[in-house]
């Protein structure tokens, strides 16, 4: 029987001539040679890479593996209630209050973004990551209101773990190296820094919080790109608190927190808003229309009188406030009676 010898390099057409612009629609139905099949594959590769030619290197080495490993951060809300202790401006997280994630203090680790303390948890700390990644949103439980310090700045929390915690571990409970805490803070625009809250601003409150989590593209949840965290916002207003113990003579300024208000200082408004109402409560009763005066940057903008008794309120104010305005409160200079232990709440 005769034998036929074949040299593939000569008998099979070389692949140095190609076409990577074939129409891929219904390609499986088109009569094709092996060369056509290869060209269909070349065309598909070019389309997948978005490059000009099928053989071009991936731009910036951004290939399918890079997409898989791409890191993202997003907000995760904890709906479990966290109870803050009396006289405390931090809280240890245990049980259901812990983040449902693993610890991620390193920028290369996936999980709940935390900052490591120099020691163990159990005391307030201002340790914060350079990108503020461990800064958490805080809301009052039940009403979902933001919380503010007496000068009007919003309160946040720093999510922190002890120095012996291990990245990749789940958060621990009492006395664990992997236990976490929230340290409550606010941003002081005057010093341009994150500042510790006074314990009186948060003590004994019940809150919910939202933390930031780092994940890769493969594990990205469906709601990761929602425009904001998922707290159900209420229509509740912001409030500024003023008070001062003792019997106050006419023209006496009240305290905002621990600071005395005056013509040139008081509760600083951080964003544009409208003063809509005010209430006053006394320890004594008056019957001569004595009351208080509300000032914006040292200029009187509203008054509230008590015609009889020890309380009064108004919801008909409409005073526009700009960022940086100072709100102060004093007893009216025309008061016929001293006001005892006045407590004033202004609604924004």
Image (cartoon, grey):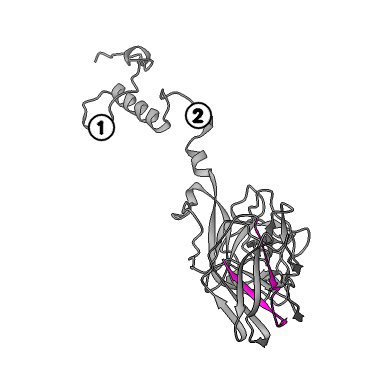
Write down the residue under mark 2: 59
Left or right: residue 21 versus residue 189 is: left
In 3D space, how far apart are the residues under numbered discs 1 and 2 (Cα atoms)? 26 Å
Whether residue 173 can be seen here: no
At a point 27% along the width and 27% down the height, the residue shown is 23
Quadrant of the image occupied by residue 194:
bottom right
**In magenta segment, residue 326:** yes
Q: Which one is in front, 119 or 172?
A: 119
| Label 2 residue SS | helix
Q: Estimate how packed mark 2 is, as few (under 14), some (14 to 19) or many (20 or more) residues with alpha carbons within 10 Å.
A: few
Residue 280 in the image: state x and y as whole percent.
Answer: 62, 78
Q: Which residues are magenta?
A: 325-348
Judging depth in this view, the residue of 305 and 313 nearest the camera is 305
Q: Mark 1 Cα within 10 Å, few/some/many (few <14, many 20+)?
A: few
Q: Is residue 63 visible?
A: yes
Q: Residue furthest right?
A: 119
**Where in the figure is residue 93, as x and y percent of width and height?**
65, 69
Reading the image, the residue beneath label 1 is: 25
In terms of sequence position, does the residue under pointer 1 or pointer 2 come before the other? 1
- Which quadrant of the figure has residue 324? bottom right
Mark 1 secondary-structure assignment = loop
Is 88 inside the magenta-drawn segment? no
Residue drawn at point x = 25 percent, y = 13 percent: 2
């Amino acid at each position: 029987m005769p034998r036929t010898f074949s040299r593939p390099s000569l008998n099979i057409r070389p692949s140095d001539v190609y076409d990577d612009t074939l129409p891929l629609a219904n390609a499986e139905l088109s009569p094709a040679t092996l060369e056509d099949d290869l060209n269909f594959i070349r065309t598909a590769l070019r389309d997948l890479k978005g490059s000009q030619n099928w053989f071009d290197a991936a731009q910036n080495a951004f290939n399918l593996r890079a997409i898989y490993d791409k890191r993202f951060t997003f907000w995760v809300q904890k709906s479990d209630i966290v109870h803050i202790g009396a006289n405390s401006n931090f809280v240890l997280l245990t049980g259901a209050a812990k983040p449902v994630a693993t610890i991620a203090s390193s920028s290369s680790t996936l999980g709940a973004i935390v900052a490591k303390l120099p020691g163990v948890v159990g005391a307030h700390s201002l340790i914060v990551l350079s990108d503020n990644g461990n800064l958490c949103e805080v809301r009052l439980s039940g009403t979902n209101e933001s919380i503010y310090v007496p000068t009007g700045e919003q309160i946040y929390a720093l999510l922190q773990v002890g120095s012996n915690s291990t990245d990749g571990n789940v958060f621990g409970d009492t006395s664990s190296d992997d236990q976490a805490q929230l340290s409550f803070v606010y941003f002081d625009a005057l010093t341009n820094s994150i500042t510790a809250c006074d314990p009186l601003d948060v003590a004994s409150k019940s809150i919910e919080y939202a933390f930031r989590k780092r994940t890769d593209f493969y594990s990205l949840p469906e709601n990761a790109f929602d425009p904001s965290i998922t707290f159900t916002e209420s229509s509740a207003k912001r409030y500024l608190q003023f008070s001062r113990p003792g019997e106050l003579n006419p023209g006496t300024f009240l305290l905002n927190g621990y600071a005395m208000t005056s013509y040139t200082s008081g509760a600083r408004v951080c964003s544009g808003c409208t003063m809509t109402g005010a209430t006053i409560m006394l320890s004594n009763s008056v019957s001569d229309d004595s009351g208080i005066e509300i000032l914006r940057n040292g200029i009187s903008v509203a008054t509230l009188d008590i015609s009889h008794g020890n309380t009064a309120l108004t919801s008909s104010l409409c005073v526009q406030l700009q960022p940086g305005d100072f709100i102060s409160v004093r007893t009216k200079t025309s008061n016929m009676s001293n006001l005892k232990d006045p407590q004033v709440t202004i609604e924004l």
